[in-house]
Image (spheres, rainbow, N blue to C red):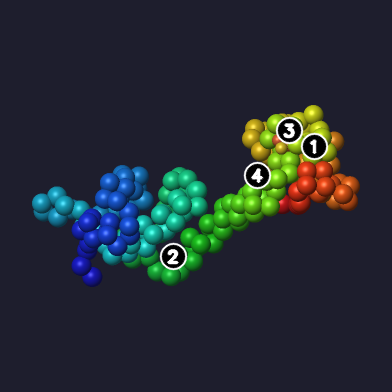
């Protein structure tokens, strides 16, 4: 198949020419140059760019995307088996991200272990900011277990959801 000039890649992917140049600079895609120095892309670049675009939209870092794409061959069009391998290596990262999104969706109205101690539930789930011992940020949203001294979902009183008029925190 005829290689594609950058404008056609931009049109078909919905990614700006400047972003495509950036992707190339970052090693996410590759092009050949014509005698006149213009970029020409193999058609499978459309699939790579679609992958990069969606991965970015769900908040994955360029490093994570680059490392996933590094498993694809540069010297030929990736086959289904190549993408299956990428998919398998990608799964743990996606599972982790999905878990975080589910907790963000379901647990944001209860204690997230961020150190604010601003909800009544914090006294139960994060007493004295015990979650700070796990690291910075909202420890329960990233999936950390509650530290010693904090109530766990199984140990929480059955009316725990009433504390903040929310559903309470479930196991990750
Ligand atoms: S919500 Fe911030 S520590 Fe509980």
For disc 2, the marked residue is 82
Q: CA distance from mark 3 to mark 4?
A: 19 Å
Give whichever of discs 4 and 1 has the lower sequence position. 1
Secondary structure beneath dot 3 equals loop
**Circle 2 or circle 1, nearest the eye:** 1
Residue 32, percent from left and from top: 22, 55
Q: For the point 68% across and 46% down, which residue is it?
A: 108
* Residue at mark 2: C-beta within 8 A of ligand 1: no
Sequence-wise first label, 2 or 1: 2
| Label 2 crowd (10 A; few <14 / some 14-19 / many >=20) | some
Give the number of callouts: 4
Q: Nearer the viewer, mark 3 or mark 4?
A: 3
Q: Is mark 4 within 8 Å of ligand 1?
A: no
Please state which of residues 79 and 141 is positioned toward the viewer in this rendering. 141
| Rendered residue at 41%/54% (across/down) | 52
The residue lying toward the viewer, choosing from 161 and 8, is 161
Classify mark 3: residues with Cα within 10 Å, few (<14), some (14-19) or many (20+): few
The residue shown at (11%, 53%) is 35
Q: In what quadrant of the picture does the N terminus appear?
A: bottom left
Which of 110 and 64 lies nearest the eye of the viewer?
A: 110
Badge 4 marks a residue whose secondary structure is loop
State the residue position of label 1. Answer: 120
- Mark 2 vs 4, N-terminal side: 2
Residues under labels 2 and 1: Cα distance? 50 Å
Q: Is disc 2 placed on a helix, strand or loop?
A: helix
Q: Is label 4 in contact with label 1 (beta carbons under 8 Å)?
A: no
Evaluate if marks 2 and 4 touch, with contact meaning CB atoms under 8 Å apart. no
Q: Position of residue 17 (x, y in %)?
A: 26, 50
Q: Which mark is residue 118?
A: 3
């Amino acid at each position: 198949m005829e290689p594609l000039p950058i404008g056609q890649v931009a049109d078909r992917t919905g990614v700006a020419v400047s972003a495509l140049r950036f992707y190339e600079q970052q090693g996410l895609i590759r092009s050949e140059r014509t005698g006149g120095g213009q970029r020409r892309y193999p058609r499978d670049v459309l699939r790579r760019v679609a992958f990069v675009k969606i991965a970015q939209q769900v908040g994955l870092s360029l490093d994570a995307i680059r490392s996933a794409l590094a498993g694809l061959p540069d010297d030929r069009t990736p086959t289904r088996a190549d993408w299956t391998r990428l998919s398998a290596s990608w799964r743990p990262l996606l599972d982790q991200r999905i878990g975080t999104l589910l907790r963000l969706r379901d647990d944001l109205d209860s204690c997230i272990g961020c150190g604010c101690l601003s909800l009544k539930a914090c006294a139960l789930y994060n007493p004295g900011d015990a979650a700070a011992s796990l690291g910075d940020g909202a420890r329960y949203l990233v999936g950390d277990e509650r530290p010693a001294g904090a109530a766990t979902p199984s140990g929480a009183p059955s009316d725990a959801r009433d504390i903040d008029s929310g559903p309470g925190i479930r196991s990750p």
